[in-house]
């Protein structure tokens, strides 16, 4: 069972590891946990590193626990933060927790015998714990000097931090103690920014119950160009398709640089070392084919969404960046269509305006309010040159009124030249 550490090492997924951790994993099936912050009703791709740690833990024969922080979400973790965050109501937290649980179930096996995954909520053990009990039974075991030495505290002292945030490491430490005593949980994992909070837990277990617990963290993912991993122009890249469409999700991975792709394929996929090295060799021989990026985008889109969503994303990508047909365009669902052409110029027409268009020139200039072509003369010149299509079909007779089969019964797509798209909505 000790293959876990070797597996994580070659994938570049170990930042810190407490002495004795490897020996513990070799000795017996070990229960390990990671905490997830319930501040949103979806996980985002930044959460995928801890999720993958749990996946590898389970694959190596150990038992993973995902702790969703119903209690800690009410406090707020200061690690890596420059300001205290808004605290959430219990109703919002519970909604977020149920959504995140459904997403975690896509990655972990909750029905495989002794090492089945579990999800726990720390609100369950904090709700009946009084403040006096907490400071008496937990607070007395750790000195203020010990707590002040943590980077998450030191980095915030100058600007000021509330007692609520200062106490966070004690609260997280108590989670580990509770799981150690009630679930025989001996390892906590997380991102490298969590090291201070995690070792507070191992120290609390040592001091309060003379137990031995362990810690392992993964590096925080950084992009080669210095921009933040997991962010796109629209903010976080979410696992919930209502927040980030499968097409945009797929595109995020497809657009990774070669340097980032070599890192991502190890961290975010379950492909073997041999498979990854083969892909890297193929990629090196023809980088323009983006073999690595396509392999990552396919693997993660299927696991987070579905095979169908992946195929739709590929088809949608080809519409913008490759050769595609009217049939390809017509096969897109409305959500994907709007996602692909989010940001292109849009025109709203009534059914009557469309019907009254005298021909292609009139339709693409006057009727569409000068958005596509500013004048009839400009429209005529480009149409004569064969550089305009509607729904991927070239307009050959520019005097005739084009036959338009509306996409999803209300849209049509105009393409001017190779790269200029316009989405027309007909109401």
Image (spheres, rainbow, N blue to C red):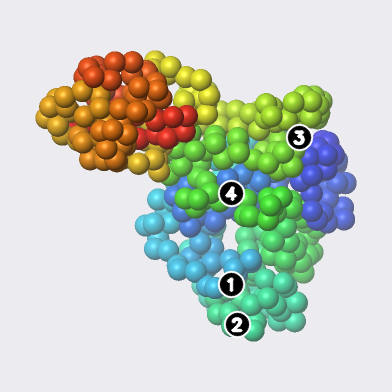
Q: Earlier in the sequence, mark 1 or mark 3?
A: 3
Q: Earlier in the sequence, mark 2 or mark 1?
A: 1
Figure quadrant of the N terminus: top right
At horizontal 63% and vertical 55% (from top left) the residue drawn is: 227
**Whole-Å distance between the Cαs marked 3 and 4?**
27 Å
- Residue on which the image places disc 1: 82
**Closest to the observer, 157 or 397:** 397
At horizontal 76% and vertical 66% (from top left) the residue drawn is: 203
At horizontal 60% and vertical 82% (from top left) the residue drawn is: 159
Figure quadrant of the C terminus: top left
Give the left or right position of residue 332, taking residue 114 as reference.
left
- Residue on which the image places disc 2: 159
- Residue on which the image places disc 3: 60
* Camera-nearest label, 3 or 4: 4
Q: Position of residue 114 (x, y in %)?
A: 67, 34
Binning the other alpha carbons within 10 Å of mark 1 as few (below 14), some (14 to 19) or many (20 upward) gives few
């Amino acid at each position: 069972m000790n293959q876990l550490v070797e597996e994580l090492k070659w994938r570049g997924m170990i930042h810190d590891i407490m002495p004795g951790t490897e020996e513990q994993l070799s000795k017996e099936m070990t229960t390990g946990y990671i905490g997830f912050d319930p501040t949103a009703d979806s996980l985002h791709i930044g959460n995928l590193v801890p999720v993958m740690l749990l996946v590898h833990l389970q694959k190596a024969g150990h038992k993973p626990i995902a702790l969703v922080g119903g209690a800690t979400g009410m406090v707020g973790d200061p690690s890596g933060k420059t300001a205290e965050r808004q605290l959430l109501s219990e109703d919002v937290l519970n909604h977020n927790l149920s959504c995140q649980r459904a997403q975690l179930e896509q990655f972990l096996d909750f029905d495989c015998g002794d090492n089945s995954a579990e999800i726990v909520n720390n609100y369950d053990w904090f709700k009946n714990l009084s403040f006096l009990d907490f400071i008496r039974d937990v607070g007395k075991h750790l000195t203020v000097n010990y707590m002040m030495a943590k980077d998450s505290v030191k980095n915030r002292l100058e600007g000021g931090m509330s007692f609520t945030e200062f106490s966070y490491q004690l609260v997280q430490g108590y989670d580990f103690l509770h799981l150690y005593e009630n679930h025989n949980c001996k390892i906590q994992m997380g991102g490298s920014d969590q090291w201070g909070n995690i070792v507070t837990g191992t120290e609390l277990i040592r001091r309060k119950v003379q137990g031995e617990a362990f810690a392992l963290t993964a590096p925080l993912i950084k992009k080669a160009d210095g921009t933040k991993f997991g962010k796109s122009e629209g903010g976080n890249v979410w696992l919930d398709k209502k927040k980030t469409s499968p097409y945009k999700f797929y595109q995020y991975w497809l657009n990774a640089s070669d340097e980032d792709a070599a890192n991502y394929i190890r961290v975010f996929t379950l492909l073997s070392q041999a498979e990854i090295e083969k892909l890297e060799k193929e990629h090196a021989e023809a980088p323009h084919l983006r073999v690595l990026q396509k392999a990552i985008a396919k693997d993660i889109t299927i696991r987070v969404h579905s095979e169908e969503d992946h195929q739709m994303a590929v088809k949608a990508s080809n519409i913008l960046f490759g050769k595609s047909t009217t049939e390809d365009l017509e096969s897109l669902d409305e959500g994907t269509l709007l996602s692909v052409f989010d940001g292109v110029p849009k025109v709203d027409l009534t059914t009557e305006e469309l019907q009254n268009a005298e021909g292609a020139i009139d339709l693409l200039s006057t009727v569409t309010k000068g958005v596509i072509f500013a004048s009839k003369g400009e429209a005529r010149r480009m149409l004569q040159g064969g550089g305009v299509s509607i729904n991927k079909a070239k307009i050959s007779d520019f005097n005739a009124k084009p036959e338009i089969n509306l996409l999803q019964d209300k849209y049509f797509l105009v393409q001017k030249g190779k790269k200029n798209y316009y989405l027309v909505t007909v109401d």
